[in-house]
Amino acid sequence: MNKIRSFAIILIFGLFISIQAHAQVHVGVYNSGLFSQIGVGTDNEKKYFGELRFLATDLLDTPLGVEGMFHRNFKRSDWVNLHAGVMLGVFENGGARVGLPLGLTFKPIQEHRNFSILMEATPNVNFDIGMIGFRGNIGLRYTFRKEKE
């Protein structure tokens, strides 16, 4: 049943991502201590954007997981974006997690605004172990978007 639920969530988030205009997507790699994540999402320069993150770890006996992130940009500029949202996650062992991510996306290279650095803090509730936690992520993103004419 867990695999069916995970597949359904992946399918729903995949459809959400594919619906976004002009197929502009970003990819990212994030680290939060012991665990890393690989993300694929919609254009993070838009007012609203989403991301699907997969747990990527080399630790033994760590359940695979997927998280859906839905964000709203509150401040957008040439150099930095401030965003907040909601995170929903499921794991193959039946665990679930919900959180409220708050992040800053820095675009440090003027000639390459598609490259960015993410700093994010997410207070969350992990229902698998019944614990409230706080996760800090730092990572790299690259957005594939059409060039402006």
Image: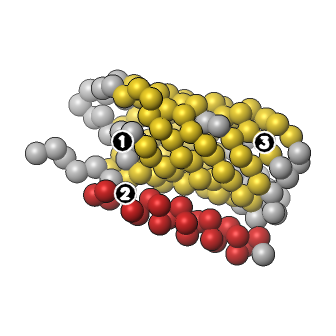
Q: Are marks 3 and 1 in contact (CB under 8 Å)?
A: no
What amino acid does circle 3 point to?
Val
| Residue 40 rendering spot, x and y as whole percentages | 48, 54
Q: Is residue 145 above or below residue 138?
A: below
Q: Which residue is mark 1?
A: 46
How far is mark 2 from mark 1, CA to CA?
10 Å
What amino acid does circle 2 point to?
Gln
Q: Are marks 2 and 1 in contact (CB under 8 Å)?
A: yes
Q: 10 Å neighbourhood of mark 2: few (<14), some, or many (≥20)?
A: some
Quadrant occupied by the C terminus: top left
- Identify which residue is drawn at 77% across, 70% down: 2
Q: Which residue is mark 2?
A: 20
How far is mark 3 from mark 1, CA to CA?
28 Å
Its colouring scheme is: secondary structure
Along the line of sight, the residue nearer the viewer: 59 or 146:
146
Q: Which mark is residue 125?
A: 3
Q: Residue furthest right?
A: 130
Quadrant occupied by the N terminus: bottom right
Question: In the rendered image, is residue 125 in sight?
Answer: yes
